[in-house]
Amino acid sequence: MASSNAAKSASRREQLRAAREREAAAARRKRIIIVTVVVVIIAALVAVIAMAASGVFSSKSGSSTKGTATTVSVRPPNASPGDKGVFSADNTNNSAPVLTVVDDFQCPACHQYETVYGPVFESLAKKGEIRLEYRTRYFLDINLKNDSSVRAARAAAIADTFGKYQEYHDTAFSNQPSQEGVGYTDDQLRNSFPQAAGITGDDLAKFQSSYDKGEMNAFVDAVDKNASADGYNSTPTFLSNDKQIKFTNSAPTEDYVMQIVKAA
């Protein structure tokens, strides 16, 4: 009996010893894992600090096709109060009623109206009969899965810096691709269009630098946001002193346009 008890006691001691060894091994593995994780975290932090010190995360002023990286936010000289849009430099009478055009540079209907009504609007602005304002949306970028509308809006806003918003606006619409969704190239928006609008030489270089830096991004975003908040979610939309109006004449005269504007 004594021999049997001794054997059982030895077996229990062996079991306890094996359990302690397993626990010790598990504790060692846990310590190794913790140390490894800490080392990895420290290495990652060191790398982030090094990149920050070298300027990897700083704003870049290089040639970005979308113009999203910038530390400068600029407003066009002819920006509307509250960043609602841009007034045409053709305006000659600050007391005239405001005719607002809400458009999108990729909108085919906007192109059609611009072709028919645009020259009439501009003539009235030069005569002092109206003040012409543009509020540019870019929601068609979502529908067409590109970013041509917003890039064109930014470029047009930059053109106002050189007093050429109207000319750039007209150039972009006259060169709207016949196939919806094709969009505009960066070469068109930053090179050929500004030149066609009369921006050349040193001014062209400044225009391109502003485009690449995205200096008008915040302003264009504000215009789009404000128009959306005001409920102008289709293009083209026309307003007379912020009251929505409609033009239906396929061969408009200046008298016809003024009749609609004054009736609002």
Image (spheres, rainbow, N blue to C red):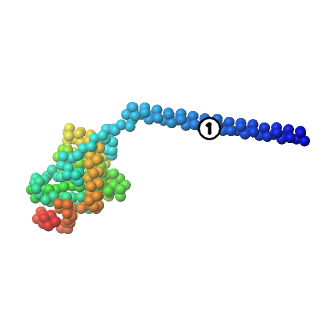
Residue drawn at x 24%, y 44% as measured from the top left = 74
Q: Is residue 250 above or below residue 225?
A: below
Please name whichever residue, 186 or 44, is drawn nearer the observer in this view of the structure. 44
Locate the N terminus by quadrant: top right
Please name whichever residue, 190 or 49, is drawn nearer the observer in this view of the structure. 49
Locate the C terminus by quadrant: bottom left
Coordinates of residue 249 in the picture (x, y in percent):
18, 67
- Location of residue 131 by image quarter: bottom left
Which residue position holds label 1? 30
Residue drawn at x 20%, y 40% as measured from the top left = 203
Coordinates of residue 151 in the picture (x, y in percent):
30, 49
Please name whichever residue, 195 or 9, is drawn nearer the observer in this view of the structure. 9
Please name whichever residue, 17 or 91, is drawn nearer the observer in this view of the structure. 17
Whether residue 117 is visible to the viewer of this picture, yes or no, is no
Q: Is residue 260 above or below residue 225?
A: below
Residue drawn at x 22%, y 41% as measured from the top left = 204
Lateral position of residue 16 relative to residue 76, left or right: right
Q: Secondary structure at mark 1?
A: helix
- Location of residue 72 by image quarter: top left
Lateral position of residue 222 relative to residue 2, left or right: left
